[in-house]
Image (cartoon, coloured by chain):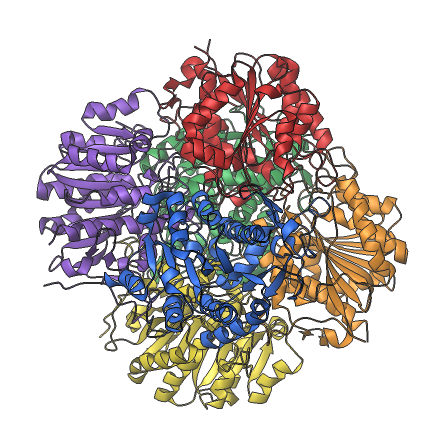
Chain colours: A purple, B yellow, C blue, D orange, E green, F red
Amino acid sequence: MIKYQPADSQVSPRFCGVRTFMRLPHVRTVENIDFAVIGVPFDTGASLKVGARFGPEAIRSSSIILKPYNMFLDVNIFERCSGVDYGDLPVVPGYIEDSNKVIAESLSPLVDKGVIPILLGGDHSITLPELRAVVKANGPVALIHFDSHTDTLDKYFGRSYNHGTPFRRAVEENLLDVNHSIQIGLRGQQYQPGDLQESKRLGFETMTSEDVHAAGPAKVIERIHKRVQDTKAFVTFDIDFVDPAYAPGTGTPEVGGFTSAETLRIVRGLKGLNMVGFDVVEVLPAYDPSQITALLAANIAYEFISLIALSKK
Amino acid sequence: MIKYQPADSQVSPRFCGVRTFMRLPHVRTVENIDFAVIGVPFDTGASLKVGARFGPEAIRSSSIILKPYNMFLDVNIFERCSGVDYGDLPVVPGYIEDSNKVIAESLSPLVDKGVIPILLGGDHSITLPELRAVVKANGPVALIHFDSHTDTLDKYFGRSYNHGTPFRRAVEENLLDVNHSIQIGLRGQQYQPGDLQESKRLGFETMTSEDVHAAGPAKVIERIHKRVQDTKAFVTFDIDFVDPAYAPGTGTPEVGGFTSAETLRIVRGLKGLNMVGFDVVEVLPAYDPSQITALLAANIAYEFISLIALSKK
Amino acid sequence: MIKYQPADSQVSPRFCGVRTFMRLPHVRTVENIDFAVIGVPFDTGASLKVGARFGPEAIRSSSIILKPYNMFLDVNIFERCSGVDYGDLPVVPGYIEDSNKVIAESLSPLVDKGVIPILLGGDHSITLPELRAVVKANGPVALIHFDSHTDTLDKYFGRSYNHGTPFRRAVEENLLDVNHSIQIGLRGQQYQPGDLQESKRLGFETMTSEDVHAAGPAKVIERIHKRVQDTKAFVTFDIDFVDPAYAPGTGTPEVGGFTSAETLRIVRGLKGLNMVGFDVVEVLPAYDPSQITALLAANIAYEFISLIALSKK
Amino acid sequence: MIKYQPADSQVSPRFCGVRTFMRLPHVRTVENIDFAVIGVPFDTGASLKVGARFGPEAIRSSSIILKPYNMFLDVNIFERCSGVDYGDLPVVPGYIEDSNKVIAESLSPLVDKGVIPILLGGDHSITLPELRAVVKANGPVALIHFDSHTDTLDKYFGRSYNHGTPFRRAVEENLLDVNHSIQIGLRGQQYQPGDLQESKRLGFETMTSEDVHAAGPAKVIERIHKRVQDTKAFVTFDIDFVDPAYAPGTGTPEVGGFTSAETLRIVRGLKGLNMVGFDVVEVLPAYDPSQITALLAANIAYEFISLIALSKK
Amino acid sequence: MIKYQPADSQVSPRFCGVRTFMRLPHVRTVENIDFAVIGVPFDTGASLKVGARFGPEAIRSSSIILKPYNMFLDVNIFERCSGVDYGDLPVVPGYIEDSNKVIAESLSPLVDKGVIPILLGGDHSITLPELRAVVKANGPVALIHFDSHTDTLDKYFGRSYNHGTPFRRAVEENLLDVNHSIQIGLRGQQYQPGDLQESKRLGFETMTSEDVHAAGPAKVIERIHKRVQDTKAFVTFDIDFVDPAYAPGTGTPEVGGFTSAETLRIVRGLKGLNMVGFDVVEVLPAYDPSQITALLAANIAYEFISLIALSKK
Amino acid sequence: MIKYQPADSQVSPRFCGVRTFMRLPHVRTVENIDFAVIGVPFDTGASLKVGARFGPEAIRSSSIILKPYNMFLDVNIFERCSGVDYGDLPVVPGYIEDSNKVIAESLSPLVDKGVIPILLGGDHSITLPELRAVVKANGPVALIHFDSHTDTLDKYFGRSYNHGTPFRRAVEENLLDVNHSIQIGLRGQQYQPGDLQESKRLGFETMTSEDVHAAGPAKVIERIHKRVQDTKAFVTFDIDFVDPAYAPGTGTPEVGGFTSAETLRIVRGLKGLNMVGFDVVEVLPAYDPSQITALLAANIAYEFISLIALSKK
């Protein structure tokens, strides 16, 4: 029985009403839903520009344009799925480790029930507690990681927890099936030659931005499928994967990235994988005057939901 | 029994969660509430800059800073009141008269039950249907009208309905107890000398911006009380009453206006009057890059709620 | 005899003077001109973000950079053409059907005289009255329609006229030679699978964004020529055809679009077709802080004029 | 015979058409007019932020809100006056002294005919050539100078001509009846104690911002009248007279300034003086995201026109 | 021997060179200086909007306009003083208590040498470690606290350290001579009636915004002097003391505040007190598109330096 | 002995401290350095939008994200090089020819010592005096010129010196080995067909934007190498080479340009050439609200430094 779906924009225009993701009902339930869109307004882990705590609000605001039928994946989401805007997880601003704990704890009831979460960040430090909750319910997962940075530093400013370190911690905590994990879009400068090697040493497959540009979307998709196979996977999408022209509103933008068309093509190419969770992170509305970053993030979350719908037939 | 009150910001930080006014629960109820905050995202009536349809979203976004205790009126709102964010009234974008109808119809269930509405515009054309609903429930009301414009034109672009005409229509429709009504803050240029006279001819008392500057807040308050007395009153606040320095995000800004401190002092001075409805209109977020206009509008709505609370002892 | 051409920027710098398109003389004439640039500052038909009424002003402002020689089409416009900035057509803000009437009526004197109009929107609802005037003078036309949306809904919010419906109305009113018409760049989500089919059912050829990305500019041009042949054609260009990175200032942006280079290459490829009118619509300056959307729209209009010049040898 | 007046905004909405000041006809005439509004888009004289070359465009854009009747001065402008938007004077960007020459030369035909100019800057260096033209026609004038800076430096960066020096040059060139001249609103820091003394030494009466705050508008007006008496006067208004909250879009903003209401009251107080020319300068649209600076400048120009109208009975 | 002073703007224009405060030399010295301007780019303590870590950069950028002679205090700073831009103190982003420690430790060498610090925030949590260093060198100090908030909460989100609690902690740590301390400008809403009482209970004298508006600058100055007397004092200035119209770029703006003119008059009124340290905090450049907040903060810091200079004769 | 390198961002976060390029020490030395980053804050030569005088500040601000290891060129810069932020060259705002002189004179001590300059503009007129200094030290150089404009006009507004003419002047002054010089990315409109021919007539090889799009980065690189060979070369990069989507903050943006990925690939392809100087010009922060233009310019300068490092093994 499909229960929750968006408000009808032919009846109440899409700019009407309290802003929820895609105009879904805002219900804090784990029953009768296949997926839940959830904000994680936390940005204490950011190393440069800050403000991702307002990311969920901005993504919701831009998501009002989304409609149920995805023509490129040919799926009418709400014929196959039910989902809600679950609201935001609580956080403790200014306190990373405390927040990590409360994020994992408040996400667990959903993933334990088999609800697939689509999480809206927040800075990338939130993916660590997300993975803790997801892995507690599912066992270790393959990571499909879109980003211009590896986020596998050991320490940053001498501290173990922030948005530069989550995936090293995740490996150390045995949260990842790292042999099926892949990092895509890496670029920007490094502190030293070994930085990128570290990701490989930890077990990740890596593709730099130039690798991706050279391969093109179709081959990138192929490589992801080859790597992940039928492992349960978690998709984490740092919006700085995309070029700053397409996503100016982010905290550590890196030039030389991808277009929105390339990005969507790759995300749609995840079709067929066994995905148990998703996030899109590092949207900073204060640097996004035309709201195009938030719009793209909303579309990426929409493709995630479409992928869930496709898997539900 | 007080039922609805804001989320506790000591528990979930104020930037957490789907944005409702003052973090009130979003419930579409008429039971157990004294007041309801309601968006009216309509801007087809605007004659110059447009975008007030996004006013309710912006005011809600800025309202998360509000807390229950008003120290200047010495009232703890939710000790005396219950209220909700009712969401937005439906509108028909592009069609003024149809929208007028649906606004009045969807507001009536609330006011008929005695719930006091605080409406967030939208352009000033929405006040006409609001008055229709309020007057149906309460009989004709005194209008306390803060604005830099009279909005009593007969026609604009040859049409009877838009944001330049609502109060002439209201007089013609016998919605106003015009002998107890007052327009405050009038300025800007006129088409001809008679324009301001028209308001007087229709029966309004008027104060230009220079009258207000000369009198000062205390005398303005006195004059309002003298005019309105114990008549049931509706307060309509066009944000362009305030100077563009304090409220840049509006559609027809007029220089030579008031500070936020003066404004709040006057609004608090409405204390003791018998007010049955309120609106604050003409907030255009696209022209409000630092969100100070929306913040001021949220504070004005907050003072309205405080006035309701004061009357509920 | 060529009469009207731009001011000389070597004499008076291009930032001097009242802003007209390309610094052309602002003359309300139908004599001695081949083309006229005309604003249509109407946005009551918009379903999401509003403000296209300021589109003509912004496009004119950005157009001051344009110079007479188009090196990619190898044509010196004013060696072959005379043209003016005709100013804006009158509209009735807030009233779509009345505006449709006045737009068509005020455009007719120009097109009846054989002047080719380049119209600057305004929201996309204006193309319906434009077509009424153009078709009255020329008979039904092929539509070459660049857009991320089909704009062939039957009703939106239960109403027949707004920016989501003009091309269904145009078909119903027999304004289009639909068998030679084509819609290019379609993307975004649909309400239901059939939405795109509707365009096809009405007779349009359609290319989605992914079709265009797969084909590349050269094949897209070929397909347009094959479809349109020597039919009299009207070119309508919704700026949301372009990706939001290149055109953030629009009302219903859709990610996954095209670059400015691809766009210009396709527009230049219209060379040789028999075009009797052009518009570029949906520019919203309030969301265009760096004015790049208006600049691109000005360049598209410039290419339109170049195409006219090429046809005038 | 009154000939030129604004377009009727009841017929064509005020956002329609090529932007001229107050929607006046754009005619390059010296006949049948009492006043002309003229842009001087020059900013090579600026010492800090630049971009005043776009000031005239922005002021025109904001001026569309102005209507003929000034209720505070009780004058219906076009019952008494005729005026046009004359367009912009030519300038040589990057070359101050050449520009000074061409500005004076192109202004002379107007002032020689007795037309009163309202000039829209441009940086403050333009007032020197304006004065040269005005004085050639009228003889030396009293200067009524609103500004946070004296602009009476001898040299800036070792050069004699830029926006820090015009009034010392004017004194040296005997353009001013300095004994009837006054500088009002002075503040900001000085290089050394003597800077302000220099203005006094040159003969100006001066009022610092604190003098003005202490005196209040009424006394300031009195002091101006006492100083200027019936001397022919030129009014130059640097928008940085106003506080940055009210006029953020300027090149060398100084905190501690005035409100728009105080400003307008003082400007209206010039009523009765014998004014032969006006300018308002230093509007930088790139720093004016909500366009409130340009709006205030447009209103100041409007008050200037009203003063001319009042003198024409 | 006076050693350090600003670059000469007559020689190299003020927009030339690496940005230091007031174009002072950037030297990390404690010798031969009376004061040091020091950034503290920390914002992990912020409860709502974030980004004060970029405050020091923005204030330095705006400070290039400052010149040595303060005409309202009649003091030529560098005739009496020597000072440098010391650069920024190190911080640990994301870790408040660690940062508190490093801030205090790195400030101590300066204050221990008797250098008077002017600290540029950063969020208000930084004042606690500043006070620790200052008090270690000077003994307990009177606090002269300009703010719209008391910042004397016990806990926020259940945590003891953030920008809502520093002054309760300071009292508990015996850093303040609370009987000579005063909080000025308090407004905004409270969680409950007792919140403001808490400040009084802790020993502070308090003035709400309405108290200040009623008293006027002169009486406020008098009251501060009466309270502080000749106690060693630390001045902490939260930019949200000022109204959002004058200081939009801050994290928790509160309407109903003060103008820049009132603010400067009060700050200059501190003349004669025995001040051993200063800060100005909570400037968020991402919300300050016209940079007027940073400019005002730079001017406040300039007045602080002037007060130091005055005390050095 | 390598002496100067950036601050360690693991110790002091990258948003700490006075902003220098890449956090390099700000030292005005010519000793012990291989390269110097130097601002040239001059914009009097600009023909349309102005404000490049703030370009160096913005590029420095964005450069804090850069780290020492360039993974795409596989070089760890400071293992091979020493470099400083030299600060800005002095200029005379408002006076082009005087500025040209002082720029050349103040650059000479560096290039005479063999230090390779990376100059941050400023408008493109600055490249002429840069070349004068560089050629005085090195003899005539090949020009590798990335730009959408040829900048080889004879006169602009009747004047010989501004940002439209530097390379014609450079040819006339025999500063260029024009037979090894190339202009890449040319587009936009021309005044007349011959404009582009002029560059060829002067001896430059030219590639229009469409030539570059057709060839692709690899072939463009090949063509540059073929043209330049082992001649000493100067690289001048006008940021308007890039498309406005990627570089909105520039003075004369031209649509139809390149992505950041294409741009970086071409710049990296300069590897192996004998380059003696570099600049990146025409960054206008006032039109760059998300700072992506400045970020890209900082990255281009970084690639320049990497190329120097590569040549130093």
Rendered position, E32 above or below D272: above
Residue C236 x %, y % = 45, 59
Furthest-front residue in view?
C230
Query: As drawn, which residue projects farthest toward the top?
Result: F1
Q: Is residue B23 left or right of residue E249?
A: left
Residue at 65%, 43% (x, y): give it.
F191
Can you see residue D48? yes
Where the N terminus of chain A falls, by quadrant? Answer: bottom left
Residue A191 versus residue A102 in the image, above or below: above
Instruction: Tell which of E237 and F187 is nearer to you.
Output: F187
In the rendering, at what x and y percent does residue A168 appear? 22, 30
Q: Position of residue D169 (x, y in %)?
A: 83, 44
Is residue E121 visible to the viewer in this orientation of the structure? no
Q: Nearer the viewer, residue C206 or F91?
A: C206
Q: Nearer the viewer, residue B280 or C238?
A: C238
Give the percent coordinates (x, y) of residue C288. 48, 52
On screen, residue A133 versus residue B55, left or right, reads left
Q: How many marks?
A: 0
In the image: residue B39, left or right of residue C18: left
* Residue D210, picture quadrant: bottom right
Rendered position, A167 above or below D41: above
Q: Nearer the viewer, residue F29 or B67?
A: F29
Quadrant of the rendering where the C terminus of chain A is positioned: bottom left
